[in-house]
């Protein structure tokens, strides 16, 4: 067997392992019980479906509803209705896009940012046990490499 075939086989196995690990992580993160636990730990009262959108708007905003729906994998009408609920709660505001006046974008409000800060702090507290035995350098490397992977994945049209 040529060196190239061995390398391809090894790379294929690594990609399969990477994909398996990502499925494991996404599956664990998408469990409704985990979301409920996070909301409780943060000490907030917000529907599970809404808090995910609120975080996405805080991270990616200002953002139009169509782009937001694409990013989180829900249909436009559902996202539009949920953004409307967040708006009525004073957690986001809708404003005209600077780039395209036909588009109304969702932006986080001061109250919404305060809530996402509470969620971030709760997520950090909950994650400490995962990284308790990790060296700080390993955590830094994970964050750096995952950020690099996410950026490459975002720009790869075939992925």
Image: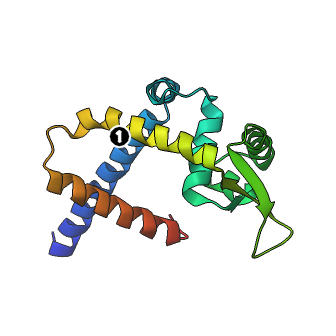
Q: Position of residue 107 (x, y in %)?
A: 68, 56
Q: Position of residue 91 (x, y in %)?
A: 67, 43
User: Which element is circle 1 on?
Assistant: helix
Q: Residue at x 60, y 26 (%)?
A: 45
Left or right, 96 with reference to 116 = right
Relative vertical location of residue 20 with respect to residue 89 in this rendering, above or below: below
Res 50 visible: yes
Q: Position of residue 65 (x, y in %)?
A: 74, 55
Instruction: Looking at this view, name the residue that lies furthest to the right.
Output: 102
Q: Residue at x 79, y 46 (%)?
A: 80
Q: Dividing the picture into quarters, in which one does residue 94 lie?
A: bottom right
Q: Residue at x 66, y 62 (%)?
A: 62
Left or right, 82 with reference to 25 = right
Instruction: Looking at this view, name the residue that lies furthest to the front.
Output: 110
Q: Position of residue 84 (x, y in %)?
A: 79, 43
Instruction: Between residue 113 and residue 70, name the one nearer to us.
Output: 113
Instruction: Between residue 159 and residue 91, name the one nearer to us.
Output: 91
Question: Mark 1 = which residue?
Answer: 124
Report the number of numbered marks: 1
Q: Dividing the picture into quarters, in which one does residue 10 lie?
A: bottom left
Q: Quadrant of the N terminus?
A: bottom left
Res 2 visible: no
Q: How is the image coloured?
A: rainbow
Q: Residue at x 77, y 49 (%)?
A: 76
Instruction: Between residue 10 and residue 153, name the one nearer to us.
Output: 153
Instruction: Between residue 118 and residue 15, name the one nearer to us.
Output: 118
Relative vertical location of residue 63 with respect to residue 86 in this rendering, above or below: below
Badge 1 local density, few (<14 within 10 Å), some, or many (20+)? few
């Amino acid at each position: 067997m040529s060196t190239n075939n061995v390398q391809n086989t090894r790379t294929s196995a690594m990609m399969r392992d990477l994909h398996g690990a990502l499925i494991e992580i996404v599956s664990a993160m998408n469990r409704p019980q985990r979301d409920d636990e996070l909301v409780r730990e943060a000490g907030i009262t917000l529907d599970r479906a809404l808090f995910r959108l609120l975080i996405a708007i805080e991270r990616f905003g200002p953002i139009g509803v169509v782009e937001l729906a694409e990013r989180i994998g829900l249909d436009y009408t559902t996202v539009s209705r949920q953004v409307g609920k967040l708006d009525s709660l004073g957690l986001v505001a809708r404003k005209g896009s600077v780039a395209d006046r036909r588009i109304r974008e969702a932006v986080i409000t001061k109250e919404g940012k305060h809530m996402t800060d509470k969620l971030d702090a709760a997520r950090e507290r909950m994650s400490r046990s995962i990284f308790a035995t990790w060296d700080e350098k390993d955590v830094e490397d994970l964050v750096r490499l995952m950020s690099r992977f996410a950026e490459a994945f975002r720009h790869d049209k075939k992925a």
